[in-house]
Amino acid sequence: MRNFFTGVFLTLLIIGIALFLALKQGYIDFRADQEPSPLEKKFAMAAVDASTDRHAPDQKNPLMANEETLLAGTKLYINHCAGCHGVPSNPSSQFPKSFYPPVPTFFRDAPDMPENQNFYIIEHGVRWSGMPAWDKTLNDTQMWQLVTFLSNIEKLPPAAKREFDLPGVPAAATAPAATPSPSMPMKR
């Protein structure tokens, strides 16, 4: 029995060393523009979801979903989120597709996670995804305003919807995706 456990231990040690060397020597490709492996597709988002489930504190949104809160959340979204997550006039531009994992486009697919988890992700970000932690930029009230906005994105009041028609909406969020001209080859 002792030989069996020694064999298992040595096998795991060799696998660990091989993985370390593969990482250290650059054999594992971390480009965002490549197709992820089947293993990564299966487990990456499940791991993010499980981590969020485990670490997001069980807290209630202290803000009411009234016009004032939703208007404030809309303005914050336009200034901090729209460039990646889209706007009603262009819910799925090309820019979010350049990330891996792909950035959620909220006007195409509204967020469906609990508010405490949305707050947690806004506050802490998601490592290796491009989603920054906003806790150094926004205060708790502002983050809850964003959470309230996201929870009500499909039923915004007219004043909040009008904010998306203003000239201050980021051009990257509203401009249609540029298509390369035949004379300009695409960089690969």
Image (cartoon, rainbow, N blue to C red):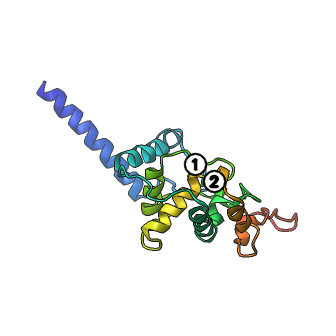
Q: From the viewer's perspective, is 170 left or right of 132?
A: right
Amino acid type assigned to the residue bearing label 2 in the image: Ile
Q: Quadrant of the C terminus?
A: bottom right
- Marks 1 and 2, the one that precedes in the sequence: 1
Give residue 88's mark: none
Q: Which quarter of the picture shows residue 124? A: bottom left
The spot of residue 142 in percent (x, y) is 49, 68
User: Height in image: 154 above or below 6?
Assistant: below
CB within 8 Å, label 1 to label 2? yes
| Secondary element at tag 2 | helix
Nearer to us of marks 1 and 2 is: 2
Q: Quadrant of the N terminus?
A: top left
- Could you tell me how far apart the alpha carbons at marks 1 and 2 are, in whole angstroms? 9 Å
Q: For residue 111, which numbered disc appears in the image?
A: 1
How busy is the neighbourhood of tag 1: few (under 14 within 10 Å), some, or many (20 plus)?
some
Q: Residue furthest top?
A: 1
Q: Within 10 angstroms of label 2, few (less than 14), some, or many (20 or more) residues? A: many
Whether 16 is drawn above or below 139: the answer is above
Reading the image, the residue beneath label 2 is: 153
